[in-house]
Amino acid sequence: MNTASNDDDRQRALQEATEWFVRLNNPLVSDETRRAYQIWLAADAAHPQAMHEVSELWGALDQPAAQLAASGWHRDAPAPVPTPRHRQPAKIGVKFAAASAVLALVAAIFMWRDPGLIDRAFADAATRPGERRDVRLADGSLAVLDGDTALNSDMAGGRRVVTLLRGRAWFDVVADSARPFTVHAGQVDVQVRGTAFEVDRDAAAVTVEHGRVAVSDPQTTDLQVDLTDWQRVAFQNGRLGTPTAIEPDQAFAWRRGLIIVDRAPLSQVVKELDKMAPGHVLVVDRQLERTTLSGTFRADDQESVLEALRATLGVRTLSVPGVATLIYR
């Protein structure tokens, strides 16, 4: 059984179920959409279970959503005076539709501002944006999770397999010559027996602190790159690149609570900002993504990075706390 493939299929089913959940809670949902949903539901045995799990996850929002709907904020006219208990079914249906609309809106906003929510909710271990966490795995190995990171682990029998669902993690692996330690992370697979290294799923990159690791592309089993102390390899242009040396002072800075960038493009800086606090960071002008920034910042101080961008690049920012930050000229 391919654990990585199963985890990827499950995450895909959960993502699709979330999309269907939002669509179906729209009071204006069409019969065509409902029929398409039934086709999707029957297409895979995993789909009904995924829909059940997503519905349970968002179930806690039913009550606040109904309260918001009853307040009448979504209508131009004032909210109607409450009616007696023997309300007509039509009026009940209107209120239910309004509550469903608000529920769908709240769910959509939550998913947009925090796309890692589903991955984290169903992971064995996870961190929110702005959080770092040490996790001791069942075999005794240590995993340090950066912000907005999620992983599953399978240490049953002779297996030592970790699937990095999103984000970035550093591993200090307990040596065991009989049981290789494997990390699946999207475009890269990593196998070791005892070493310390980092896997960044978003960047499709692996960095070694000490020891030796074998990095491969799960789609091309005949290609393998071996790394040793202070080396890094990344997936580029459709394939694994060649190993490059890294600066020890800059490597793994996030574990020390720092973000160090050296002439880093703004597109890379934005990825770091997204890990530091809830909400999206968006660059409005695509040309800005190629501008660069250098500096050392605290990993828990997103505003200091934004201030550096404003001071050095002459950009402006507009923030809605916890929802989004726009970067523009």
Image: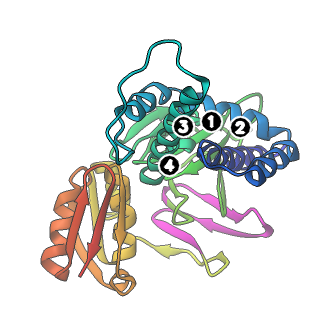
Q: Is residue 269 left or right of residue 119?
A: left
Query: Is the Cβ of the residue at disc 1 closer than 8 Å to that at disc 4?
Result: no
Q: Residues within 10 Å of mark 1 (few under 14, many from 20)?
A: many
Q: Nearer the viewer, residue 36 or 258?
A: 36
Residue that label 3 marks: 100
Q: Earlier in the sequence, mark 2 or mark 4?
A: 2
Query: Is the Cβ of the residue at disc 2 closer than 8 Å to that at disc 4?
Result: no
Q: Secondary structure at mark 1?
A: helix
Q: Earlier in the sequence, mark 2 or mark 3?
A: 2
Q: Is residue 196 above or below residue 263?
A: above
Query: Is the Cβ of the residue at disc 3 closer than 8 Å to that at disc 4?
Result: no
Q: Quadrant of the C terminus?
A: bottom left
Where is residue 167 drawn, in percent x and y? 49, 53
Residue that label 2 marks: 50
Residue 140 seen: no
Task: Tell me how far mark 2 sits from mark 1, CA to CA.
Answer: 6 Å
Residue that label 4 marks: 108
Q: Quadrant of the N terminus?
A: top right
Q: Which numbered marker is on residue 54?
A: 1
Query: Is the Cβ of the residue at disc 2 closer than 8 Å to that at disc 1?
Result: yes
Q: Secondary structure at mark 4?
A: helix
Give the residue drawn at x 85%, y 38%.
Answer: 45
Task: Tell me how far mark 3 sits from mark 1, CA to CA.
Answer: 15 Å
Name the amino acid type tagged 1.
Val
Task: Tell me how far mark 2 sits from mark 4, CA to CA.
Answer: 17 Å
Mark nearer the viewer, 2 or 3: 3
The magenta segment is 208-235
Q: Nearer the viewer, residue 274 or 211?
A: 274
Give the residue drawn at x 22%, y 65%.
Answer: 318
Name the amino acid type tagged 2.
Ala
Q: Residue 224: say if magenta.
A: yes
